[in-house]
Image (cartoon, grey):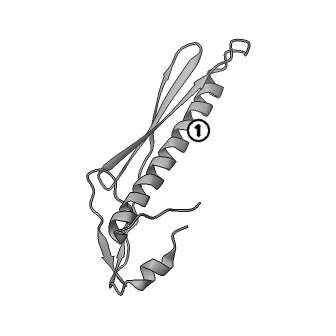
Amino acid sequence: MLDTRAARAHNDESLPTKGVGEGRSLGMVPKGVPTMKETSEIELTFEEDVDHTNAQASIVIRGATFTGSGRARRNPVDANLPMIGEELATARALSDLAHKLVEAATEAISEREGRPVQLQD
């Protein structure tokens, strides 16, 4: 969780928008201005062979593309059930994507504050 005390200490009439990804700038939304609703889709792609499934999860947020990857390996003694590999690889790709989004948000806040910050879950 972001410590809001530091944010309150600034007598800024603006609030920061979402985090900064590569090639993005930190926009400001003046207080009292209605915010907008955005919808983004996560694209999943798979590559599979008999024993491995690789997944990539990508999302574009305000022009910045974030990508996470995940891999699942079938144990040779287990039955060949591709759906299980896809589920595990997808979960791992989404987890990796989530971590990258948190890193981008942390970077954006650090740049805005002019000091390192650490976000807590």
Question: Could you say which is closer to the camera, residue 2 or residue 35?
Answer: 2
Residue 60 pos. (x, y %): 36, 48
Residue 20 pos. (x, y %): 34, 58
Dot 1 crowding, Cα within 10 Å, few <14, some 14–19, many 20+: some
Residue at left offset 32%, top offset 85%: 13
Report which quarter residue 26 is drawn in: bottom left
Identify the image quadrant of the C terminus: bottom right
Left or right: 54 as drawn, with respect to 73: left
Residue 23 pos. (x, y %): 26, 52
Question: Could you say which is closer to the camera, residue 49 or residue 24?
Answer: 24
Residue at left offset 50%, top offset 48%: 99
Q: Is residue 11 above or below residue 55?
A: below
Identify the image quadrant of the N terminus: bottom right
Residue at left offset 57%, top offset 37%: 92
Q: Is residue 120 above or below residue 9?
A: above
| Number of numbered labels in the structure image | 1
In the image, farthest residue toward the bottom: 11
Residue at left offset 73%, top offset 16%: 78
In the image, farthest residue toward the front: 115
Left or right: 75 as drawn, with respect to 26: right
Q: Is residue 109 above or below residue 51?
A: below
What SS does tag 1 mark?
Answer: helix
Q: Amino acid at mark 1?
A: Ala
Residue 88 pos. (x, y %): 62, 32
The residue labelled by disc 1 is 91
Question: Could you say which is closer to the camera, residue 21 or residue 89?
Answer: 21
Left or right: 49 as drawn, with respect to 67: right
